[in-house]
Image: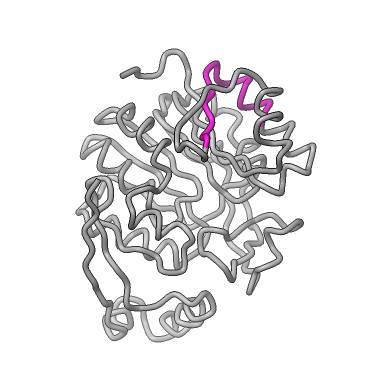
Amino acid sequence: MTTSVSTATRPLRAARRLLGESRVHRLGRLLRRTRIRLGVRRVTFRGVRLELDPHSANSESVLAGRFERALLDFVIPRVPAGGFCVDVGAHVGYWTVPLAAAVGPTGHVVAIEAHEPNVLRLRRNLDLNDLTNTDVLNAAAQDRSGQAQLGVSGTSSSWNSLVSSGTYFQDSVSVVTVPAVSLDALTLPESIDLLKIDVEGAEDSVLAGAATVLPRCSMLVLEIGGLRVTSESYVASVTQKLFDSFPEVHAVDKSADRLVPVGSVADLRTRWIDRQDVTKVVAVRRDAPAL
């Protein structure tokens, strides 16, 4: 896969015109706090243009064309033109933008991202590709609508987390209050081609708020989060919903960068969870599109 790179800057005066002076100052403080630079690189990744987030741990793998390759190779060809996808924990669009391109002008994507600086870059990435088929919600998906506390990571903008215990908050440089919404509270279609959830250990809360949505999803991409696997309630909640809802589950074998089938909760626990490893799975209904 060929990845092309260029450089771009976004003048501060343009931001002032668009956002107003006070909001620019507030956003500037957030950007400095997370060390995001105004000068950024743009790349072509999986056929779309992306403005990389220099403060994200994922940007190097996007630049190299390796970002979540096994999952994207499996999912993107199975997302139909005219389809509907929901991206929870959308970050700056490394999934959202390829999905929006895949479903095309007759399809639709809902992207949910809690951190405002990420949302601004996500919208720029959609604009870079002239994609108008995506709704971006600046909110956290949770088990109920209201407000939530977001820990802003001092290490990577993709590691911001709603989890208030464990290691997820240890590198936080600030905690901000953000709107929260449950997926069940949104007006979503009866058929959802893909639900992707990657929210740094808060997956159980998102799934708890998606009781009516999950049965309507053909595919689910889910991160089962690292050090939160020491919480038995988290593990039980996530794995039960996963295997109760989907008959076919695959997990990423990171050593070989490929998907391998997972036959049961016990299999998932033995090979990944008991090692306290972060893994990502894709689950498919038998009526989902096949290649």
Foreground residue among 12 and 56: 56
Would residue 208 be found to the left or right of residue 44 on screen? right
Quadrant for the N terminus in the image: top left
Picture quadrant of residue 122: bottom left
Foreground residue among 52 and 113: 52
Would residue 276 be found to the left or right of residue 39 on screen? right
Residue 51 x/y as whole percent: 31, 63
Picture quadrant of residue 36: bottom left
Foreground residue among 235 and 30: 235
Residue 141 x/y as whole percent: 57, 47
Residue drawn at 45 percent across, 85 percent down: 25
Would residue 225 be found to the left or right of residue 74 on screen? right
242 magenta-colored: yes
Applied colour scheme = one colour
Taking the view exactly as shown, the residue that stands out farthest to the top is 286
Residue drawn at 54 percent across, 28 percent down: 214
Quadrant for the C terminus in the image: top left
The span shown in magenta is 239-253
248 magenta-colored: yes
Q: Identify whether 23 is placed above or below 61.
A: below
Residue drawn at 24 percent across, 54 percent down: 3
Q: Identify whether 259 is placed above or below 144.
A: above
Q: How many dots with numbers?
A: 0
